[in-house]
Amino acid sequence: MNCILRGVRVIDPVAHLDSAGQDVWLSDGRIIAIYKHIGEGTLPVIDLTPKPGGQPCVLCPGFIDLHTHLRQAPNADDEHLAENILSGSMAAAAGGFAHIVNMANTDPVIDNPEIVKDSAAFSAPAPIQVLTTAALTRHLDGKELVDIAGCSQAGAVAFSDDGRNAATPRLLSEAIKTTAEFNKPVFIHPEDEEIIAQVNGVTDSVTGCSNRPPAAELKAVDFGIRAINHAGRGRLHFQHVSTAAAVEAIAKAKEAGAAVTAEATPHHLGMWLPFETAPTPPSLAKVNPPLRSERDRNAVVQALREGVIDAVATDHAPHRPESKGDDYEEAAPGFAGLETALAVCLTLGGMGGDWLPVLVDRLTVAPYRVLGDGAGIEEPRLRIGESATCVLFDPAQEWVVGDKPFFSGGKNTPLLGQTLRGRVLMTLFEGSAVYHDTERLPWDAPGGHD
Ligand SMILES: [Zn+2]
């Protein structure tokens, strides 16, 4: 890779840079220069200049996903899984993500320092950076905290029982206090399990229950806010916020100075119920928390635009086809989301047009700040002369979901067959082209340095 990308919009939120009509000189995984016009000399030029009135391609720092399920536990067999570290990290690269935070609810659960250490080592060969979370409680059952000091030292960047929310506010408060000593945030899946159990009439696992009222989210968010206030320090992050009521509670807590942050998924930004046409099978639309009303969706979009919700996070949850069968109640919840995230936000999620630079912020520096400097990743910037970690995307390119095979082992999305706008053309991670669109950027193979 040694070329000039002509006519690009360069966005670097940390540098307050947003400038169209730029030429970008790339050489051997580095951005050598960004100028209004670079004479080509002997370099090949890839002209990306948009047609008059068209939208330019965007170059920005690589995306950070705070919420990914790669399914594969360290050293565990991946034969029966929908995803493994390699397929999931390739899917991330194709979606523009350079860093992803892998959730701990694998089998076995990542809930002790040894397995955290193994997980970090096992993920190290991935083409992008796979960061490891540790569970907050042993076996995710909300009874006993993990060894927070040990897991933190072993490389956990955050603590989360995602998928479950069984810890009492008191235990959560203790966890927030302890993780603060190691400069790590606690992430919670804010759905109150008691409410869900009651309304569904179950006494055991609530994970598969399809009736998940907004009140369950609000109660869990309120408990979380109470827990961090009681802790008096630390950081608490609310995962996949989906309701207007939770948004309001988080806004109030932030105004009062609580160290809380929040994320929204592309699907809660871009979809609401009822669908005009349900997907086939309908279980492809099953997700926790569920898709909500249009009013809730609008509140989530508004909150992301204003920064009440800090970041976009995919909650990429790949499943095998047999887990998304005809029986809605039995079907597993979750969508594969890494490869559609950008396009869903731009096309359906209210973050296209004038909101595009805000979206770039919410996919780069905002999630970086949620993790904090305890995660050990570099601030997302476009650094001249250094090995680049960045993404190039065309916000206007149309594509049909499912037309090209996913890198992910999970094809479970209600968007199959839909036309979206916004396509990643290239992802560089520390100087390596971990993904590139060979039609639009005709140079040699990804990963190749020429
Ligand atoms: Zn969750």
Image (cartoon, rainbow, N blue to C red):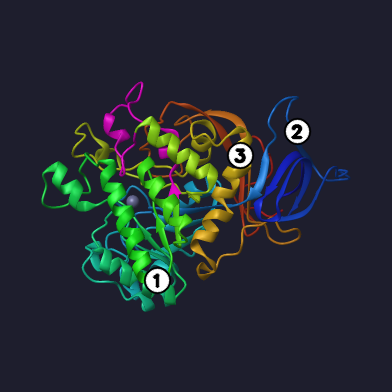
Relative height, residue 287 to residue 130 (above, below) = above
Name the element at disc 2. Answer: loop
Asked if the beta carbon under badge 2 is closer than 8 A to the nearest atom of ligand 1, the reply is: no
Q: Residue at x 22, y 49 (%)?
A: 207
Q: CA distance from mark 3 to mark 1?
A: 36 Å
Sequence order check, earlier mark of 1 and 2 = 2
Relative height, residue 27 to residue 420 (above, below) = below
Q: Is residue 413 left or right of residue 281?
A: right
Sequence order check, earlier mark of 3 and 1 = 1
The residue pinned by badge 1 equals 232
Q: CA distance from mark 2 to mark 3?
A: 18 Å
The label on residue 49 is 2
Q: Residue at x 49, y 39 (%)?
A: 302
The label on residue 144 is none
Q: Residue 7's quadrant in the figure?
A: top right
Give the amino acid type for the residue marked by disc 2 in the picture.
Thr
Q: Position of residue 295 (x, y in %)?
A: 39, 32
Q: 381 or 400: nearer the eye?
A: 381
Q: Residues within 10 Å of mark 2 (few under 14, many from 20)?
A: some
Q: Residues within 10 Å of mark 1 (few under 14, many from 20)?
A: some
The residue pinned by badge 3 equals 356
The span shown in magenta is: 263-292
